Image (cartoon, rainbow, N blue to C red):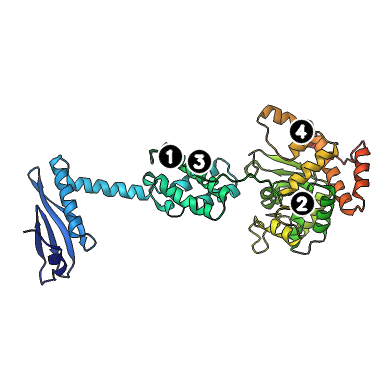
Amino acid sequence: MALTDVQVRNAKAQKAAYKLADGQGLFLQVTSSGAKLWRMKFRQGGKEGLLSFGPYPEVTLGAARERRDEARRQIRDGKSPALEKRREAILAKAAAGNTFAVIAEEVVAKREREGLAPTTATKLRWYGSLLGSVCDRPISEIEAFELLDQLRKIEASGRYETAVNTLAFAGRVFRYAIATSRARRDVAADLRGALTSPKVTHHAAILDLEGAGRIMRSIDAYTGQRVTGRALAMMAHTFPRPGELRLAEWCEFDLRDATWRIPAARTKMRKEHLIPLSRQALAILEDLRAMSGGEGLVFPSIRNRGKPLSENTLNTSLRGMGYGADEMTSHGFRAMASTLLNESGKWNPDAIERSLAHGDSDTVRGAYHRGLHWAERVKMMQWWSDYLEALRDSTNVQSLKSRSRASQRAPGRPQPGSLAR
C-alpha cells in the first residue's frame, strides 16, 4: 500500500533502522536517530542497484515519487539512473563554476593581459557587480528577462548611461562564454532597444579667457591639500586625461629633458604619449619632488601614499572652489586648452590634436606627425603656460587677447635634444 504524507510525517525513530515501502521500489528509511531518507531499489541488467533521493522533509513524498518515476523511465530507455545522477551532479558543479561573475572576471583579466588600463578594468568589474543576482547564476541558464530586471533597477535611479554600459559589458561576457563553449547564445543581444537612451553630455569646461584667468587664480589661492592643488595646476598646464595624471609615477618624467612619457598601458588610445613640459610644469614637479622625494606616485592619496588620488578628488576640489558640476570638471581642462589654443590661431590644429593624444588610425601618418609637430608642440606648451599666467594676472583680458593675436611669434625655450629630431 502506498504511503501517505501523514504516515511519513509521523514515522518515529526505533532502536533499529526500518523501512516504509511506498511502491515500485521507493521506500522511506527511518534511522535510529530519527532521520528519514528516501531510497529506491531497482534491477538493471540482472544487477540490483540503490538510489538515494535525499532526506524528508526537504524532499517531499510527491517529489520522491517524481524522482522514482524519472529513474524508471531512464531504466526503460536503457540508461543507468546511478550514472545519470552522477552526470547531473558533475554538470551542476561545472555550472556553479561557470557563473556570470566567474566568466566576467575572465573577460576583464584577459583584457588586462592585453593592456587594459587599471582604471578601466575597475570600471568593468563595477559594471558586472551591478547585475546583482545574475552574477551568481550559471551563465548558460540566464535568460533575457533576468538581465533586464537588473538593468531596470539601474535605470530607476536615473543612471541611463550606466545601464547601457552595463548591458554592453554583459554582451561581451556572453560572447566570450559562447567562444569558450559555456553558453549557446548571447541573451544580452535580445535587449537591444529595451533601455532608455542616455542624453549625450559633454564634460563641463570653461572655454572663455575670463573664465580661464579666474580658474587659474582659484588654483593659486587653493587652501586644501597641497598635492591636490598641484594636481589641478598640472592639469591646467599639461591637460592630460585625469586618470593619466592621477596614476603618474616619477619614473615617467625626465626633468632634464623636460618630457613626460605616459606609457601606452595608461592611455586611452593604448599608444605611448609624450608631453613637452613648460618651465611652469617643471616648477610644479620640483615642488612635488621636494614633498615626496621623487619616488613612486607623483600624486599620492592623502590617506595612503601607496595609492593615487581618488577619481573624485579633483572634481570635489573644484566644487569647493565654487565651480559647479555644470561649469567645470577635471576633464574640462582638456576642452579649455583645445578651445583656447585653436582660437589663438597660432598653432597647427594637428599639433594641438597630437598634444591632446587624440588617436590616428593611420600608424604611419601618426608616426610622421609626431616627428613633424614635436618642435611646434614644445613651443606651444611653453606659450600655453605663459598665456595661462598672463590670463591669471591680467585685469584687461580683451587687451591681452588683442596683443596675443597681433604677436607673430610664440616664445620658445630650449628644445629637448633627442626628441626634437
Amino acid, disc 3: Gly
Q: Nearer the viewer, mark 4 or mark 1?
A: 1
Residue marked by disc 2:
234
> Closest to the observer: 414 or 183?
183
Q: Position of residue 388 (x, y in %)?
A: 84, 49
Q: Are marks 1 and 3 in contact (CB under 8 Å)?
A: no
Identified at 16% across, 67% down, the residue is 9
What element does badge 1 sit on?
Answer: loop
Q: Are marks 1 and 2 in contact (CB under 8 Å)?
A: no
When the figure is inspected, residue 390 is found, relative to residue 374, above or below; the finding is below
Q: Nearer the viewer, mark 2 or mark 4?
A: 4
State which quarter of the image contains the C terminus.
Answer: top right
Q: Which residue is mark 4?
A: 350
Residue 38 x %, y % = 17, 59
- First reached walking from the N terminus: tag 3 or tag 4: 3
Assess disc 4: are there few (<14), some (14-19) or many (≥20) residues with their C-alpha within 10 Å of its C-alpha: some
The residue to which callout 3 is attached is 193
Q: Which mark is residue 186?
A: 1
